[in-house]
Amino acid sequence: RKEVEQDPGPFNVPEGATVAFNCTYSNSASQSFFWYRQDCRKEPKLLMSVYSSGNEDGRFTAQLNRASQYISLLIRDSKLSDSATYLCVVTLTGKSTFGDGTTLTVKP
Amino acid sequence: GAVVSQHPSWVICKSGTSVKIECRSLDFQATTMFWYRQFPKQSLMLMATSNEGSKATYEQGVEKDKFLINHASLTLSTLTVTSAHPEDSSFYICSARGVAPGELFFGEGSRLTVL
């Protein structure tokens, strides 16, 4: 089993749609959780940290469920510019493990 | 603006040659940097942790003698792919830790193509 598993995707959605990505992690001792965005042939960039209380940044909402070892990312009102690969990242004692990523394509 | 700069962005070389990739932290000191490799449609795989002033820590399965890492200063880590072969062609990315726990700043990445 992979340490971090994500929805395989790809997700193809129309503009304005709401889309949700899921991620599970295997190590219950994991300490920090993040969503990164990676555009084609570019480096990953931090989208948002994920907290147990849930956090929201504009159209993006992230949620962490430690009991289920599950992380989610919700994107509302999808824009064409949201098209990218979204990486779930889990960190333990300074070491970060990346999921394989979920590719989102938002179409007009 | 970028806080971690990586160079070169892309490089094409002949099989058997060595290629050096630089990773610099801008305006901050990075005692620890990380080197990753990413093949098409796959995630980032940590290759090694680069520690300033000491030997790098390599992940299982990564050849130390093939991927030489030097972290001689607080702002520069280098990865040298020695005797590169076509199977080494990949996207190599470095990162440095941010202030928040687990936060990472990535370099722009270096795309290596070995002919």
Image (cartoon, grey):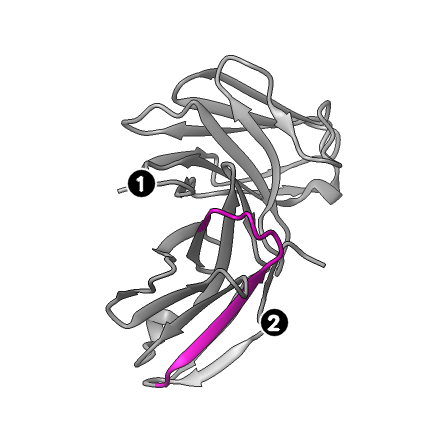
**Residue at (28, 72) in percent of width and height:** A59
Mark 1 = which residue?
B2
Residue B74: image x %, image y %? 40, 18
Which stretch is magenta? A17-32
Please tell me in which quadrant of the rendered image residue A61 appears.
bottom left
Q: Nearer the viewer, mark 2 or mark 1?
A: 2
Please tell me in which quadrant of the rendered image residue B17 appears.
top right
Taking the view exactly as shown, the residue that stands out farthest to the front is A67
A1 and B52: which is toward the camera: A1
Q: Measured along the vertical axis of the image, is residue A61 above or below residue A17?
A: above
Label 1: element kind: loop
Which numbered dot is residue A8?
A: 2
Residue A82: image x %, image y %? 37, 70
Discs 2 and 1 carry the same chain letter? no
**Residue at (64, 52) in percent of width and height:** B39
Judge whether residue A5 is colored magenta.
Answer: no
Residue type marked 1: Ala
**Residue at (39, 35) in percent of width and height:** B5
